[in-house]
Amino acid sequence: MNKMETTDSPVITSLHQSDKNERQSENNLDSISEVEDLITLPRMERGKETTLIDTSSEDNLNPKYLPVDIQKEETVVFDVSETGKPSEDNGHEDSGEFVVAMLARGNLEEQGVCTKRISSPLSETPLEASSHWDEDVTAESWRQHRKHVFVLSEAGKPIYSRYGSEEALSSTMGVMMALVSFIQSGDNIIRSVYSDEHTVVFMQQGPLVLVSVSSTRQSEQQLRNELLYVYNQIVSMLTQASITRIFEHKKNYDLRRLLAGSEKILDGLLNLVDFDPSFLLSAVHCLPIASSFRDSLSQILQKAITPNLVFSILIAKNQLLTIAQEKMVIEDAKLDPSDLHLLLNLIGASSAFQAGEIWTPICLPSFNPDCYFYTYISYLDPPECTVCLLLLSTDNEAFYAVAECKRKIEEAMQAQNALTSIAKAQSYSVSQVGVSDLRHFMYKPFDVPDNHHQLTQFTSPEMEAPYDSEEEKMRLLDLYRDMHGRIHSASRPLKLIYRVAARETLLAWVTTKFELYTCFSPLVTKSCAINAITKLLRWVKKEEDRLFIRYPPKYSTTPNASKS
Amino acid sequence: MSARGNARTNGNLPQTKICQFKLVLLGDMAVGKSSLVLRFVKGQFDEFQETTIGAAFLAQSVCLDDTTVKFEIWDTAGQERYHSLAPMYYRGAQAAIVVFDITKPETFERAKAWVKELQRQASPNIVIALAGNKSDLADKRLVEYEEAQTYAEDTGLLFMETSAKTAMNVNELFLAIAKKMPKTDTQNPTHAARHRGVNLQDPDAQSSRSCCGN
Ligand SMILES: Nc1nc2c(ncn2[C@@H]2O[C@H](COP(=O)(O)OP(=O)(O)OP(=O)(O)O)[C@@H](O)[C@H]2O)c(=O)[nH]1
Ligand SMILES: [Mg+2]
């Protein structure tokens, strides 16, 4: 409770310190003030991979980084990082040039310069011509999408494309695959390609290759995280073990057979990734409700248990109300927010869950990528279908027992008239904080009680005017993403960013206790903003019992001896 | 005759016998399994019915003379990735509806494969019905009525052409199955509820398990 209050003064001090630093550097950094680490902090989310391209670095002389011109002065820089063994710098220059030629070809095809789809000269199996596609992949509008995402197999077979059908794009995918496999053969892994307009990020996960082609100016790490979500959503449906097994058996297996019907889930995921900051922050957003009410919901879940039940999750309007977890299981492995995001996306992406009581295997990839949980899914308020109960068991035979738990939960909730209270619950307005000029914020605390078992959470008000249109929402999120990228930059992480943009002023700040992104009206002064943040932190402290799940409930369901 | 009047879990009239059966729907994706079930249970049809994930459990009762037959229905997903899970849903089922789409011959072939699998691996006394769905799309028909009927006769299946869209033969199909179910059961509903999924006909069904923790 007092933890945060006691940090109030150091908080102010470090802000002032940074203020000075900023003033010194203000000129050369334009309107963006950046402050390097003042205190040593645990660097969160710093990727294991450390090579990030820096176009301005002297590495440009290194043959590994080849600036090449393709079409209209677009500068493309390759970032080819070594894998494993110490590098034997030989022949990379050649491979780089070759790759660039391939990419240029891919680029031409994408841009419709070649009107006929040609299959890639490098792909071993001829790629069939497309029969139909939703979107004309040669059209200008197709190229204009902010972010394309492709998934293909190592053999170059298309698996998923965010826009247009995979088949129509098979030549483009073939070129991408050719790139990847060529670089791989030289013991390198192609990681990213930069041009003035696009960032192309490649990621290999087992037998799958994922590619993001983005004009969003997001950091490579962010795009990589997004690709990981896509991969994990696929794993959540098939498990990693079975994907590996399938491709071991048959290298050019068409994985679309097994993913039929799930394009919508992946489309929905990429949409959420763009609009829901939960993914950026790797944290869960819960619906604000009185802590006493949340506690009583938690108790209802805690009481309705059966052997092998491991997670009981209650969600409303696609936000978390409460989650009860099996003690022993949670001691083994923590439930990762990303697994919850995948679950929430799955539920939101399909109306099929409204049809009755669902019993389906679902894998939580961060928890265990090779195993299924048998998941019971049922809405508690048909026909509106806004309040959803998820019960995850390790026992595939447990449906009837788990369904009985749902009935207990339903009865207990009815007795308290809980559905009516849940229906009234809603996100809050930034005006409730009572800080003028503050338009929006995202606050992710680290100093939660019972940290080991805790789900990482964040809180954020509704996006209101001027951020109430889709474009404006996206613009603000892009500003946040940019600051997030700088704060978590692997090469030069920052603790504080004060940025005066054209239409708003933003301040991002990370400490050992929290990560915070704020957006103010453009006329706010720096000292005003600092004051406002102090007030905001006090408000969050005061409201934290309502905004967060403070003590996630646990239960103990003695595992059945007969089941392993 | 309509099943609609019955509340999902009622049937506590002293003079009616209650029988409860587990019924599973199998068939290729998009043949209309969920549509048939939703037509039967809720009287609805959705042009944009979404593909099932895993399997959906629903219940509906029909009245036959002095007996209320309560179906506990497993509407399974036709997507290939769920095929290996099918036994989990059809194990212990006393009835199955194998569905194909009369406009898609490959779904008829797939239906035959399901029938084979059921005859090999499901409860020995399972009643299997074959449903040729989307009969409203007569102009696109590619599986002849006679062909499917001959196959059903040879294999000992109930057969009907249905349309979830127009409701043709939907209640009739479930009713025909209900008629074929053994009515020897005299268990009261509370008892029956405790033994969901138990094959009432076959006392030594290996799948018998009482699950609810009372
Ligand atoms: N014209 C017509 N369309 C139908 C009929 N039954 C279902 N459909 C349509 O066919 C499509 C697929 O129906 P579903 O009920 O989802 O099929 P399913 O067998 O449950 O599919 P999966 O859950 O993927 O296995 C939907 O667009 C339905 O509207 C029918 O009798 N006539
Ligand atoms: Mg279905």
Image: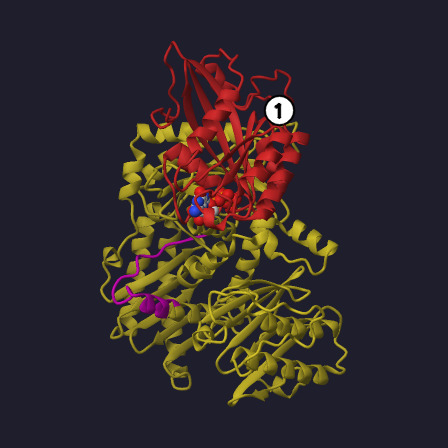
Q: Quadrant of residue B38?
A: top left
What segment is highlighted magenta in the picture?
A455-477
Q: Chain of mark 1?
A: B
Compared with residue A100, is residue B101 higher up or lower down, i.e. above or below?
above
| Residue A161 percent coordinates (x, y) | 53, 64
Q: Residue at x 60, y 54 (%)?
A: A257
Query: Is residue A57 inside the magenta stretch?
Result: no
| Residue B97 percent coordinates (x, y) | 54, 33
Compared with residue B121, is residue A314 higher up or lower down, i.e. above or below?
below
Compared with residue A247, is residue A390 higher up or lower down, i.e. above or below?
above
Give A45 or A37, whichever is nearer the viewer.
A45
Q: How many marks?
A: 1
Amino acid carrying mark 1 in the image = Ser
Compared with residue A230, is residue B196 higher up or lower down, i.e. above or below?
above
Query: Is residue A476 inside the magenta stretch?
Result: yes
Task: Assign a secondary structure to mark 1.
Answer: loop
| Residue A21 percent coordinates (x, y) | 41, 78
Q: Is residue A303 shown to the viewer in this render?
A: no
Q: Residue at x 56, y 82 (%)?
A: A114
Q: Is residue A461 shown to the viewer in this render?
A: yes
What color was chain A assigned in the picture? yellow
Q: Quadrant of residue A76?
A: bottom right
| Residue B2 percent coordinates (x, y) | 37, 26
Residue most extreme to the front: B146
Shown in red, the chain is: B
Is A168 on the left-hand or right-hand side of A244? left
The residue beneath circle 1 is: B207
Q: Quadrant of the C terminus of chain A?
A: top right
How many residues crowd around disc 1 within 10 Å: few (fewer than 14), some, or many (20 or more)?
Answer: some
